[in-house]
Amino acid sequence: MRRKTCIIVDDHDVVRSGIRLHLKLVEWLEIVGEANTGPKALDLIRDLKPDLALLDLRLPELDGREVTAAVVAEKLSTHTVIFSGFGTTALAEQALDAGAYGYVLKSVSIAMVVEALRCAAEGQRFIDPSLAAELLFPGSPPLSPRELEILKIMSRGTQNSGIAFALGISIDTVKAHVSNILTKLGVDSRTEAVATALRRSIIE
């Protein structure tokens, strides 16, 4: 992947500073600007035309969703990822409907933030695992983060023993997770589970 430019937008200086320190270590990312309000973020996006913008959901004057909607309305090329302290599917859905490429919670690891940015850079959607299942098919029991992790590994054709080794858990634990995944997706086999997950964009 070629190097991607990114801006960081949050109204708390300490949050921006912490994120910047981590993202500067990512080889394919170049942090080119920061902002602490929605209007300043939009001005930066217009002026710098960054590939990516990591936006806090709650911002002064214009929130992250409104900034995203403006980016889409003005046909700007920047792909936005919402970084939120609010873990509700309604807010995530509003952000994605506005045109955001990702929605991640502030409680996640920096690795997941980087993964969300990578997906956005490639034109793919990324939804925080804790919200993904409920958002994509409301009313069904949501897959846990561990179940989503196992489902992604299953999609590569990895058997239970390989999954157990990769995650450092027992084969019996893997089998229990796989059984839960099949039940929650309403399917009878691993192949069907992967096909259903891909069709519903639970995994890429």
Image: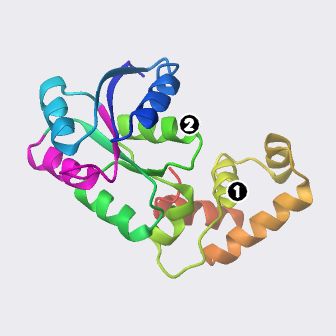
The residue identified by callout 2 is: 110
Mark 2, residues whose alpha carbon is within 10 Å: few (<14), some, or many (≥20)?
some
Q: How many marks?
A: 2
- 104 shown above or below 119: below
- Name the residue tied to disc 1: 146
Residue at (44% x, 28% y) in the render: 17
Residue 107, position as x, y percentages in the image: 56, 50
Label 2 SS: helix
Q: Secondary structure at mark 1?
A: helix
Q: Start and end of the magenta stretch?
A: 52-75
Whether residue 55 appears in magenta in the rendering, the answer is yes
Q: Is residue 163 above or below residue 130?
A: above
Quadrant in which residue 29 is drawn: top left
Q: Residue at x 73, y 71 (%)?
A: 180
N-terminal of the two: label 2 or label 1? Answer: 2
Residue 187 visible in the current orientation: no
Q: Amino acid at mark 1?
A: Arg
Residue 5 versus residue 176: which sits nearer the camera? 5
Compared to residue 102, the image places residue 130 above or below, namely below
Corner quadrant of residue 112: top right
Q: Which mark is residue 37?
A: none
Label 2 to label 1, Cα distance in Å? 17 Å
**What residue appears at the point 66 percent right and 52 percent down from the top-left corner?**
149
Residue pictured at 32% horizontal, 58% vertical:
96
Please identify the quadrant where the N terminus is shown: top left
